[in-house]
Amino acid sequence: MRKGFTRKPQPDAPATSVKNYITPGGLQRLKDEHRFLLTRERPAVTEVVAWAASNGDRSENADYQYGKRRLRQIDGRIRFLTKRIEAAEVVDPEAPRAGPAAASAFFGATVRYANAAGAERVVSIVGTDEIDLNRNHISWVSPLGRALMKSAAGDSVVLQLPGGTENLTVLEVRYERIAVEPFREPPGAQASAKGLPRRR
């Protein structure tokens, strides 16, 4: 087939083979950011671009050039968030589980484990949009997440690392609320700067 008839995958298209599992808190954060960009940040940047365009020559107008670039970034992020929200499959870690599922590590589990040296660590298995290493939130598709998946207290698992393997012992698996950092308006956002006098 000629190259002209082949279709390249779009860079912002989500992978169809991997489901977008997410906790309720993680989905809320995506929705909050989406709403902020759509209803506050984009209108504020659009207003700045319109003001800059009214100042004349756009080719040497830094406010206009920056504003247009920022609008493209916002639109790209809105498209990305829209797809992630539409593909989201919410899994509540606090939902009751029965049988082996209650004692085994799956999405939403909080797992306490020890390495070969006996050092203990606790991690929560979350979605790819919720990774927060400061809170020990790891992705279910990360090497550690994959190693812990389906394990139960007392199991030994092998963590595959680029430099070799590490043996881990699972000490405890529990399901509880996973506190996700809520969306916060980024510093320097145009929406928060609205009302500041503009440079003339």
Image (tube, grey):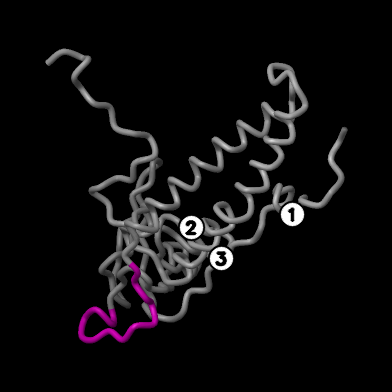
Q: Residue at x 49, y 60 (%)?
A: 30
Quadrant location of the C terminus? top right
Q: Residue at x 43, y 81 (%)?
A: 176
Image position, residue 190 (x, y; %): 71, 47
Please state which of the two labelled residues, at mark 3 or mark 2, is closer to the viewer.
2
Q: Residues within 10 Å of mark 3 (few under 14, many from 20)?
A: some
**Which label was assigned to residue 192?**
1
Q: Identify which residue, 168 or 111, lies in the foreground.
A: 111
Q: Is residue 76 left or right of residue 165?
A: right
Between the residue at mark 3 and the residue at mark 1, the CA separation in whole angstroms equals: 28 Å
Secondary structure type for disc 1? helix
Relative height, residue 170 to residue 18 (above, below) = below
Q: Is residue 195 left or right of residue 109?
A: right
Image position, residue 114 (x, y; %): 43, 68
Between the residue at mark 2 and the residue at mark 1, the CA separation in whole angstroms equals: 26 Å
Q: Disc 3 residue type?
A: Arg
Q: Which residue is the site of mark 3?
A: 135
Q: Residue at x 57, y 66 (%)?
A: 181
State which tag comes first along the sequence, 3 or 1.
Answer: 3
Q: Identify which residue, 17 or 98, lies in the foreground.
A: 17
- In which quadrant of the rendered view does residue 22 lie? bottom left
**Which label was assigned to residue 118?**
none
Image position, residue 60 (x, y; %): 74, 17
Tell me the magenta residue range.
Answer: 90-103
Q: Identify which residue, 91 or 195, lies in the foreground.
A: 195
Secondary structure type for disc 2? loop
Secondary structure type for disc 3? helix
Q: Is residue 97 magenta?
A: yes
State which tag comes first along the sequence, 2 or 1.
Answer: 2
Q: Which residue is the site of mark 2?
A: 131
Quadrant location of the N terminus? top left
Q: Disc 2 residue type?
A: Ile
